[in-house]
Image (spheres, rainbow, N blue to C red):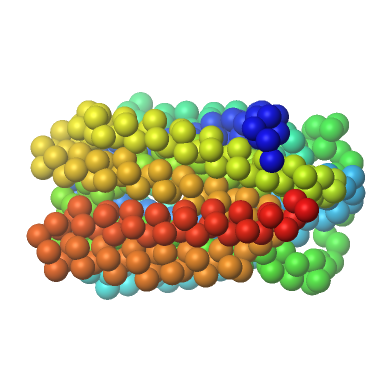
Amino acid sequence: MKKTDILRELRPTLALAFPIIVGQVGQMLMGITDSVMIGRVGTVPLAASAFANSVCNLVFIVGLGLLLPVSVFAARAHGAKEPRECAEYLRHGMALALAIGGAVLLVLGLMATQLGRFGQPVEVVAEVGPYYLLLVTSLLPAFLHQVLKQYSEALGHPWAPMLILLGCVGLNVVLNWVLIYGKLGAPALGLEGAGWATLAARTTAVVVLWWWLTRQPAVRNEWPQRWRAALSWPRLREMLHIGIPVGGQWLFEAGAFSAAAFMMGWIGAVPLAAHQIALSCAAFTFMVPLGLSSAVSVRLSKVMGEGRREAVRPIGFGALAAGLVAMSCFGLIFAFGGGLLARGFTSEADVVALATQLLLVAAVFQIFDGAQVIGAGVLRGLTDVRIPTLITFVAYWIFALPGGYLLAFKTDMGPVGVWMGLAAGLGCAAVFLGWRFHRLTCAIAR
């Protein structure tokens, strides 16, 4: 593998990744603008939004993992020039999204009466109810949108989903301004208003993306002709064979961060609010390696469909190198500008001080975070998902969470200890996923 091979393959990876990254940044901006605008209302509403998002984001990420085979198999079918297969993977993906979304609505809706059992501050539980239910409802259109977005990207059309999502971010900001603060004659709904804005923006995103896809001549041959035809159980099993392990990987990682939020809540409302600020910043920069992960997964699926095995290692290692460079740059921003970033969310001095400390830890752990998500992406493009699932379980639930709990509650490190435990888990995942790709592709490249 030569340096020139890596650079040659890196260019198309970055070309595909850029609009995906921008679109994912736009999606993250929806959550960040919620946090910023809710933070102006007070610390308790901000902590309540952190609690609700911890619960909903965990389920959302698992659902996305279950739906991710749409991009893997559609890209492979597209590379093999099988348009009917592309259409069938989209149709089955939409059916899965409806089924998963319906189940989520039922289960999380029933959980609305049990939120007090999570050990959060009483004032947070009293505030969170309506916002939580609206956030839960918005997950169904979010799942449908993700299937359409992944399908469009797999066919080499990432720009329209990006622009549509950015437009919906702007819609979310406007609706937040109107509904949270009571502008233009609307009632001031506070935290609940942010929930209505998110629901409206996510619904608009799926409707507009569907409309765009149905009007594209380039997509017509790979668009389902019979949506109501019977589903193929072998095809669904094929998709779930990949989706369930990927959902497990994302469950272990997202579950670790949700559990970290719960531990912050056990300490108090201020640590929970600071955690939400620092996590929002880290999640924002995480969109870069996450976009690279999606792009490299699609590219590897496509080249495997084309039979170009010699391109696998240059594509994978090029994406890993690009991710490490980007996350190192963001780490410097967190290390030297953490206080400024925190003050952009809230004026509460105690929240700002703690968030600044957490961002200092994030400056290190996000480098590991970027490496592990790209490592998982390159393996997913090769349909290698079972061993990576085991790696993520060990990294987050054997190292990260127990280590974070011990550092937070058995020493005087407190909230910072929780984040140091997360850093250890991410580092473990990054090393072993990268090693797995190296060993696996040594055989593929021959």
Q: Residue furthest top?
A: 184
Q: Is residue 218 above or below residue 233?
A: above
List x then y, in percent, for residue 160. 66, 30
Q: Is residue 59 above or below residue 5?
A: below
Q: Nearer the viewer, residue 271 or 429?
A: 429
In the picture, the quarter occupied by the N terminus is top right
Q: Nearer the viewer, residue 56 or 79?
A: 79
Q: Is residue 406 above or below residue 314?
A: below
List x then y, in percent, for residue 363. 31, 40
Residue beneath the point at 79% across and 48% down: 309
List x then y, in percent, for residue 301. 74, 49
Residue beneath the point at 10% across and 37% down: 349
Residue beneath the point at 68% across and 45% down: 313
Which image quadrant is residue 111 in?
bottom left
Q: Is residue 329 above or below residue 202?
A: above
Side of 235 where 20 appears, left or right: left
